[in-house]
Amino acid sequence: MLPDLPPLPALTRAEGELIDRYLEAADLLGRVNPAHGEDTYRALRAAQALVRKAAELRDALASMHRRGESELHGDTLARALRVLDGERRTARVALPPDGVR
């Protein structure tokens, strides 16, 4: 049985789209990170997909702006990222500790 996760905070549709696109881009950026690299072909494929995801992330933010959502509510969005495993998913973007791969 899966552990009970905290509830996802209330988000607008555009905020939900922003979070989803951000995490997808972070996943791909983690695959491109040369410090965690495995092979160039895998990194190349991730970089190619990252271009599309970056455009989708841009579009999510543009949609928020057009709807008059001019603020990013950092605390709420950070809670959503944590519920959606954002800490693990973004960890591969950073450099690993010295000597650890």
Image (spheres, rainbow, N blue to C red):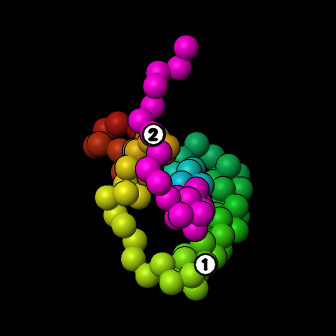
Per the rendered image, the range of residues in magenta is 1-22
The answer to whether residue 2 is visible is yes
Q: Residues within 10 Å of mark 1 (few under 14, many from 20)?
A: some
Q: Position of residue 28 (x, y in %)?
A: 59, 54
**Sequence-wise first label, 1 or 2:** 2
Name the residue tied to disc 1.
63
Q: Residue at x 37, y 49 (%)?
A: 79
Residue 62 within the segment the image draws in magenta: no
Residue 6 within the segment the image draws in magenta: yes
Q: Position of residue 9 (x, y in %)?
A: 44, 50
**In this rendering, would 43 be left or right of 83?**
right
SS type, badge 2: loop
**In this rendering, would 30 be left or right of 94?**
right
Badge number at residue 7: 2
The answer for how far apart the CA atoms under marks 1 and 2 are is 25 Å
Residue type marked 2: Pro
